[in-house]
């Protein structure tokens, strides 16, 4: 088979190029007739502008394949307009979960999970499961280039607390508690006073808006993530390769998880903060709410 063409197939690989805004829209049709499109189906593409044009591929000696819009019956072999559909496995996402932005005035966080610093599925040996607390601003680790950071694995619950001057009788803090999770140990949770978009790296690193952690600017709102699964961070060979296979997500594996978001009153928070005697702890509140 020619280079780039799966074994057992004939033809030449053709890359999709061009902007949909400046090119006709093409309708994919099966040679075998109406039906669900499947891998190995023979298909052709018809222009949606009513011109009856088809996409055709021509092989020119010593040149790359040429793709053009043609009309049948004008000296064009119909075979040139037939393509064999190849469906590749889609890569799994870096994480699967929930992300939201909370209103301003949340200042502190307390959680029961791994800590006191960030942890990931391939980087948690230095963390212990326990009860930790700190300022939300301190949960962001400012790597030289802004990137994924601050995750907390095996988190059973997390409480985001308002500042003293902005407490409200009905919602002094917000409890996030895992109810059901894939691993049986907890969920991945993290919170930041910076937009999560500032940590996401585009394919072209030079296009990243914030290129240095010193340029990050805290904002009043808090971004909260509750994830069922997240890939590892790698780094075993100076960041050259992806994480090990066992630390990558499987795009074919279903994930099921659930959690609750519950506002806590000033009274609830005061009782839970004591954590002794008959006082309610955040964990007890979470278990009671899950029932």
Image (tube, rainbow, N blue to C red):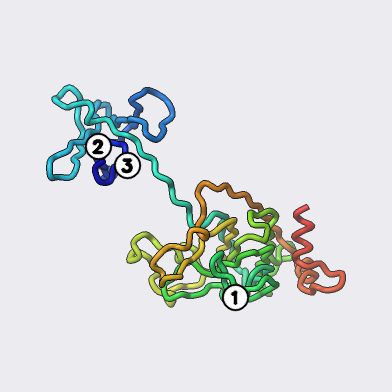
Within 10 Å of disc 2 (Cα), the crowding (few <14, some 14-19, many 20+) is some
Within 10 Å of disc 3 (Cα), the crowding (few <14, some 14-19, many 20+) is few
* Circle 2/circle 1 CB separation < 8 Å: no
Indicate the secondary structure of the residue bearing disc 1: loop
Q: Which residue is mark 1?
A: 126
Q: Residue at x 79, y 74 (%)?
A: 274
Indicate the secondary structure of the residue bearing disc 2: loop
Left-right relation of 96 to 215: right
Within 10 Å of disc 1 (Cα), the crowding (few <14, some 14-19, many 20+) is few
Residue 174 visible to the viewer: no
Q: Which residue is mark 2?
A: 11
Foreground: 220 or 202? 202
Foreground: 10 or 109? 10
Q: CA distance from mark 3 to mark 1?
A: 46 Å
Among numbered discs 3 and 1, the one appearing first in the sequence: 3
Q: Nearer the viewer, mark 3 or mark 1?
A: 3
Q: Residue at x 36, y 23 (%)?
A: 32
Q: Nearer the viewer, mark 2 or mark 1?
A: 2
Foreground: 126 or 75? 126
Give the answer, above or below, for where 149 lies relative to 17.
below
* Residue 171 locus on image (x, y percent): 71, 63
* Residue 176 locus on image (x, y percent): 67, 61
Q: Which residue is mark 3?
A: 6
* Circle 2/circle 3 CB separation < 8 Å: no
Indicate the secondary structure of the residue bearing disc 3: loop
Q: Residue at x 29, y 31 (%)?
A: 45
Residue 252 - label: none
């Amino acid at each position: 088979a020619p280079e780039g063409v799966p074994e057992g197939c004939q033809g030449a690989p053709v890359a999709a190029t061009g902007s949909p805004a400046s090119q006709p829209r093409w309708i994919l049709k099966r040679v075998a007739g109406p039906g669900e499109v499947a891998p190995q189906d023979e298909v052709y593409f018809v222009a949606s502008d009513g011109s009856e044009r088809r996409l055709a591929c021509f092989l020119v000696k010593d040149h790359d394949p040429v793709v053009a819009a043609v009309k049948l019956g004008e000296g064009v072999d119909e075979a040139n307009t037939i393509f064999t559909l190849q469906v590749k496995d889609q890569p799994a996402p870096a994480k699967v979960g929930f992300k939201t932005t909370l209103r301003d005035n949340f200042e502190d966080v307390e959680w029961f999970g791994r800590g006191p610093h960030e942890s990931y599925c391939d980087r948690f040996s230095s963390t212990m499961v326990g009860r930790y607390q700190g300022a939300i601003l301190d949960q962001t680790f400012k790597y030289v280039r802004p990137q994924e950071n601050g995750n907390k694995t095996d988190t059973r619950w997390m409480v985001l607390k308002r500042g003293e001057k902005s407490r409200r009788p009905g919602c002094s803090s917000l409890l996030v508690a895992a109810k059901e999770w894939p691993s049986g140990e907890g969920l991945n949770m993290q919170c930041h006073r910076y937009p999560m978009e500032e940590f996401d790296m585009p394919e072209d690193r030079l296009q990243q808006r914030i290129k240095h952690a010193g340029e990050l600017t805290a904002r009043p709102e808090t971004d909260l993530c509750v994830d069922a699964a997240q890939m590892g961070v790698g780094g075993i060979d100076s960041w050259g390769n992806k994480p090990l296979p066992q630390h990558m997500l499987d795009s074919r594996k279903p994930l099921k998880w659930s959690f609750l978001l519950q506002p806590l009153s000033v009274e609830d928070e005061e009782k839970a903060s004591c954590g002794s005697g008959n006082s309610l702890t955040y964990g007890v509140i979470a278990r009671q709410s899950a029932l």
